[in-house]
Image (tube, grey):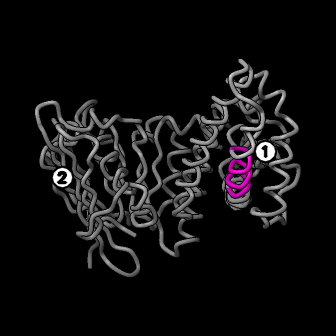
Amino acid sequence: MYITRIYADGFKNLKKVDLSPHEELNIFWGKNAQGKTNLIEAVWLCTGVRSFRSTKDSKMIDIDKDHMTIEVSFKDNFREQTVRYSMDKNNLKEKDLFLNGVKVKTPSKLFGQLDCVVFTPEDLDISKGSPENRRQFIDLCVSQIKNNYSGVCAKYDRIIEHRNALLKNIAYGKSSKDELEGWDTQLAQLGSYISLLRYNYTKKLASFASKLYSEISQGKEKLEINYYSTVFSKLEGRKDFAGDLAREYLDVLKKNTDEDIRAGFTMKGIHRDDIITKINGLACRDYASQGQHRSTALVLKLSQAYILEQEKDDAPCILLDDVLSELDEFRQKFVLSKIKGMQVFITCCEKNIQFEKNQHGRLYNIEGGRIKTHKRKEKKD
């Protein structure tokens, strides 16, 4: 898969950016606050996933404009498609989203069309950050393959909010325990489905990441990745999420009801699970060095790209937003060597990333939200 055109106007500081990226390497350089990350973010929004910068809708439109438009055209193994994403400052709730000229209701309906993997400096904290960060990472990975998955997760989150509010009311004598039954049944069904998909994805992730980590550590260290469930002691080989797994999940909720009421929230469930990483048998969260955390994060993101390629039989586009400057030369070369053959977008402050021998692409300068100049290094016949 590769992007054939990017148009953006009014999205943050971007002003009538209209470019046809190279099929291999695209480097965007410029000083801070010139629009490099905004361009990467614009592309990412067209995948259907919310902003990796958690940008609010009210902040997406240029302060001096009333409207923003993003258009991204891309080719996969079968056809060329176009996503159009626009919004007016006077009606932020109404997003105009179109796929090939046909309006779609929500961004999540775009899932599975334009496949991208984004690397940001914040991603380097996946390994040492909170369990919530790792849950969000695994949920994003699964949603790129299972289009309905994000909707299931959103529904689970809404039910958890209702259940937690009800637990507090029960503690204050305003509600009875009997009212939990309906919420518990729904949580058990949704939670079992999510647990199974997370577990199966984590197994694939572990397979790719362990091999990559062995390479980046030059065979000196072994990385293990496992899914930790607060509900199930065993998920291997299990498939009946609507039957046995749901009943087991429901039993756990019922057994913990009194504790949950005392705590005022649901103490066990997929919202409390984690992805456990270990290096040479020691938990990364407690014992890994900064370098080990960064290597772990890199192989996790690379594995995400490889799994997407395996599942879709087509390589995703790679978005590297100011990540290479955070890495030493060895890790820079490692990452670049592992994404050859994929279309890559890199942002950086200095144009010090050189095209290697037999590497082809374009170098763009961004200033004040505009593409000022670009240089080419094309293949020779």
Confirm whether residue 214 shows in the render.
no
Confirm whether residue 277 shows in the render.
yes
Quarter of the C terminus within the rendering:
bottom left
Is 245 in front, or is 223? 245
Horizontal side of 24 relative to 280 (left or right) equals left
- Kind of residue at disc 1: Tyr
Residue 376 position within the rendered picture, expressed as x and y whole percent measured from the top left = 22, 60
How would you classify the magenta stretch by its main secondary structure?
Answer: helix
Quarter of the N terminus within the rendering:
bottom left
* The stretch drawn in magenta includes residue 123: no
Residue 334 position within the rendered picture, expressed as x and y whole percent measured from the top left = 55, 51
| Neighbourhood count class around disc 2 (C-alpha, 10 Å): few under 14, some 14–19, many 20 upward | some
Which segment is the magenta one?
183-193
Residue that mark 1 sits on: 228
Q: Residue at x 78, y 56 (%)?
A: 246
The residue lying furthest to the top in this view is: 172
- Kind of residue at disc 2: His
Horizontal side of 44 relative to 289 (left or right) equals left
Residue that mark 2 sits on: 374
Q: Quick one: label 1 or label 2, which is nearer the N terminus?
A: 1
Residue 293 position within the rendered picture, expressed as x and y whole percent measured from the top left = 65, 36
Q: Residue at x 74, y 21 (%)?
A: 171
Residue 297 appears in which quarter of the rendering? top right
Residue 114 position within the rendered picture, expressed as x and y whole percent measured from the top left = 39, 63
Image depth: mark 1 or mark 2 in front? 1
Q: Residue at x 37, y 55 (%)?
A: 106
Horizontal side of 22 relative to 332 (left or right) equals left
- Does 314 sit above or below residue 329? below
| Neighbourhood count class around disc 1 (C-alpha, 10 Å): few under 14, some 14–19, many 20 upward | some
Residue 56 appears in which quarter of the rendering? top left
